[in-house]
Amino acid sequence: MLSVLRRRTLCHTPIGPVRWIAGSGSGSGSGAGRSIRYAFPPAAARKQSEAYKYPEWLNVYRLGSAATLWLGLSRVCTFVIFGVGACLYAPGFYFSPEHSNWMLPAFIVGSAVPMVAVVLASGPSVHAIKIQLPARARRTRESLLKLANNVPPHTRLRLECMKVLPWPTKTDVYFADLTRHAPGWREGLSNLQHTPLVNKASPYEATLWHSFVRRLLGRYYVQRDQSKDRSSAPGVWEKMWEQIPEDNALHAGRQRKAISRPSAARTELKPLTPPGPRLKPSTRP
């Protein structure tokens, strides 16, 4: 074992897997098998690794490091403001004989306002998006662009974003479950929404509680006006973004679909007949 490690240290030769060969039973040995360790991996494994140009999880969107650091620090500052106001200033006013105890809830609520405003107003800021590529799209850029022009609905995306906490978390979603919208006072600072197909048909989807949870956990913000594409495959995310349906168009499509449903069977209308007895045709000689 020491000799093998010494040879690996001196020549830096990659050692491949062990292949066991059974002994023939002749010679000075006891007939036991012997092992041959290849210096390089098999040719089939090398060809398979060289055939793929892109990894299985390809980065198609990446936010700048400065913007990611700024978002994290802003959320940390809101937590610091809440901690200082609730743990330092509030007890000081509570034990002070010169101030009223009514200042205690005012300090706690006031220090929590920046944190709650940042969490509710701004959606989770996405700083990286990865797509799971099939084997056919990992070989050339032409095959990758062909997939980007027509993304299958079951394609998995991995969103790395900052939600309530100031450190990034990973969320796997399907491409068919995404809708986009313009930021506004109702949607907040977000332009991407994740609603699974199972929840779209739920009767509780329009309730106030579900809308609050979806606003807090199901909405994201993807920066669109980047001066430089920092992803591993530039231009892929732009093609994918155009295929994400808009939320307003989706609701309009649902309304049109609901209106175009066949109604109940109508009663047949009989032809109108003029009132009074019918005149017999006169026969002239």
Image (cartoon, rainbow, N blue to C red):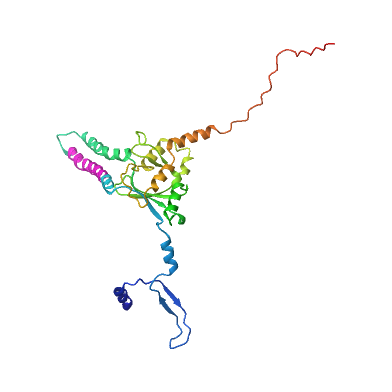
Report whether residue 252 is seen.
yes
| Residue 133 in the image, given as x and y percentages of width and height | 43, 54
Identify which residue, 70 or 227, lies in the foreground.
227
**Identity of the residue furthest to the top in this view:** 285
* Residue occupying image coordinates x 41% and y 62%: 50
Q: Is residue 79 left or right of residue 40?
A: left
Report whether residue 213 is seen.
no
* Residue occupying image coordinates x 25% and y 43%: 74
The quarter holding residue 277 reads top right
Q: Is residue 152 above or below residue 267?
A: below
Q: Is residue 106 above or below residue 217?
A: above
- Which residues are drawn in magenta? 73-94
| Residue 161 in the image, given as x and y percentages of width and height | 34, 47
92 inside magenta stretch: yes
| Residue 266 in the image, given as x and y percentages of width and height | 63, 28
210 inside magenta stretch: no
**Identity of the residue furthest to the right in this view:** 285
Predominant SS along the magenta part: helix
